[in-house]
Amino acid sequence: MDSNNSLTSFWTNESTLYTQVDNFPNANRQLLSTEGRNLFILVNHVILCSFISMFGVGANSVNILVFLKQGLKKSLNLCFFLLAVTDLMGLLTQLWHNFCLNPYVSYINAPLVFGQIQILTAGKPNACLVRITGWITVYITAERCLSIAMPLKIKQIVTFERKALILLFIYLVNVASLVPLYFSAYFSWNFIPAKNTTFLGVSYRSNKLVIQDLLYIFQASLALAAFACTVMFTSILIVSFKKNAEWRQKSTFDSDQTKTKSKRENRTVRMVIVVACVLIVCYTPACVSSIVSAVIQDYSITGRQSNIFEAVWSFGFLLHSVNSSINMLLYYRMSGKYKSTVQEMFPSCFKLNVSVQSKG
């Protein structure tokens, strides 16, 4: 595909998400107006999502430092550490994504077509990192299920080396799903007749349609499979947790040491359940939207109801940012070890807090 055809496709809303085109050919059949779509994008992406993402960048930076200090070989620390790293990178790409999707940015006379640039620099990398977050959560919940099913053998089955290899495999598979896209798409200077201006945008090679169809199927399958597995393992954890709690209440043979160990394991399982449930809630709109778009042809970026599609996905991105930003609060609330490590690393902050409370 040559440069002119690529940019013509862009300005008719066929090659990217959130292109901000006022003269969209299906605009008169849209249930949601272009102004309404832009309002959702402005509020959800530019304002709310950016604010939450900035908080999340700081929170995940603290998470990374805490788990490094505690040691990555302890319990689930390696998983939580990689989860924080992935969420941090995802939030950084989301901040750039939010800027590119700003409805007012497209009207700036700059030599960049932000709606296209974001595909390779923000949109696709962010979606990949979101999938990795989902699969790391799948592994965390699966390991906890295994520890409940085989508590005496879990340390022999799940070694640090095996855990690292599984997590590395998760990264490699998801990153590999992006490789075909970067072989078929590239940055190029293109002339836009409608504006009589040359802009830096994205062009595609002749295999664009085949590559995009295959990538969409593979990436959507990865995302939906991660969501389904998380729901399944979390449900098993909740049922097992309740059964174990009932059994311990009836049991009269637990020693003090066993009770202490059980309480510690219960806190870990409870925290894993909460983290997984937050992910399920935050990922549900995006998964439902993906399924609906596969069933209803009009509900897509190129369909008759593209404005509603974009508005719904703005909530999806917003909730993804919430999921990536909130873990620090959950860890601090539910893990005494995490809380003590944070207080040890940032003593001046907590001394200030105590002094303020005493004065109040």
Image: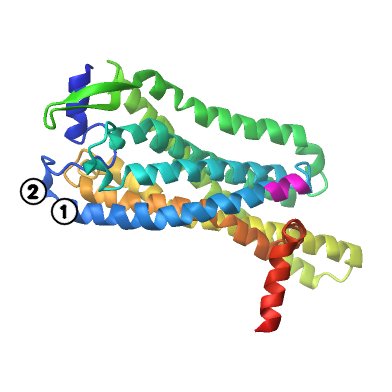
As drawn, the label of residue 33 is 1
The relative height of residue 217 versus residue 300 in the rendered view (above or below) is: above
What is the x, y in percent for residue 121? 41, 33
Out of 34 and 305, give the one closest to the viewer: 34
What is the x, y in percent for residue 111? 27, 31
Residue at the spot 40% in from the left edge and 22% down from the top edge:
182
Q: Chief secondary structure of the magenta span?
A: helix
In the rendered image, which residue does mark 2 sit on?
28
Is residue 188 something one can see in this rendering? yes
Q: Residues within 10 Å of mark 2 (few under 14, many from 20)?
A: few
What is the x, y in percent for residue 270? 66, 61
The quarter in which the C terminus is drawn is: bottom right
Q: Secondary structure at mark 1?
A: loop
- In the shown orientation, is residue 224 left or right of residue 74? left
Segment tinted magenta in the rendering: 65-69
Q: Type of residue at label 1?
A: Ser
Q: Type of residue at label 2?
A: Asn
Is 49 within the magenta?
Answer: no
What is the x, y in percent for residue 188? 30, 21
